[in-house]
Image (cartoon, rainbow, N blue to C red):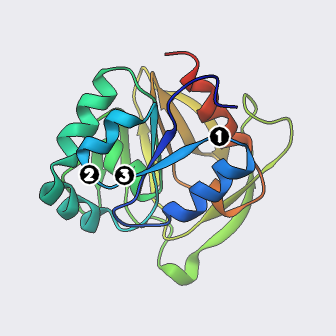
Amino acid sequence: MNNGHKPVGILAIQGDFSMHAKMLDAIKAPWKLVKHSADLDAVSGLIMPGGESTTMLKLFELEGIGKAIKEFAAQGKPIYGTCAGAILLAKEVLNPPQEKLGLIDIAIERNAYGRQIDSSIQPGECPDLADHPVEMVFIRAPIIRRVGKGVRVLGRCGNLPVLVEQGNVMAGTFHPELTDDQSVHKYFISKLSRD
């Protein structure tokens, strides 16, 4: 599934990056862990996993990786953030406001579903990606409260947008890497051939 591209990068400074690696293995997409800004030179796209967004921001400052990710996005390379990754990609962060990369025009509310014990698995719809209900795992998940004009909603759970894209940037509030459903990762990999 490589199509001659460099491997997909998985940001590995904090969070559930190993599960994304397992999903990419399952769909036969080569991957490489990204721990330093220089690692971005060797990858064709970037997955930003869930974890703790404020911790990730501190590590971004230490490594200078936030600026490198912005430059990576400016080159048109695909980026996909899940949960905390989506928070970092957002233009506006609520509850409380925090620093972010501002790469996709959404407003996102942190921990909007509640605490860890309020985590859940629900069926959702991603009609452009899958012809079946998609299992969605929400863990201390954020909620997308506003979708900007140029943002396309790819997935919904109930009345809420849960997977969105704007150009080369995708953001999702659930964890597809914790299920057997490969639809979201396959769609992201397909974006590599469009650059």
Q: Secondary structure at mark 3?
A: helix
Residue 36: give its label.
2
The total of numbered circles placed on residues is 3
- In which image quadrant can residue 179 be found? bottom right
Q: Position of residue 109 (x, y in %)?
A: 37, 56
Q: Residue visible at 43% across and 67% down?
A: 15
Farthest residue toward the right? 132
Residue 29: give its label.
1
Q: Are marks 1 and 2 in contact (CB under 8 Å)?
A: no
| Amino acid carrying mark 3 in the image | Ile
Please state, as top left, top right, bottom left or bottom right, where the N terminus lies in the image: top right
Q: Position of residue 56 (x, y in %)?
A: 28, 62
Q: Residue visible at 64% across and 48% down?
A: 24
Indicate which disc, 1 or 2, sits on the residue closer to the N terminus: 1
CA distance for labels 2 and 3: 20 Å
Q: Secondary structure at mark 1?
A: loop
Q: Residues within 10 Å of mark 1 (few under 14, many from 20)?
A: many
| Amino acid carrying mark 1 in the image | Ala
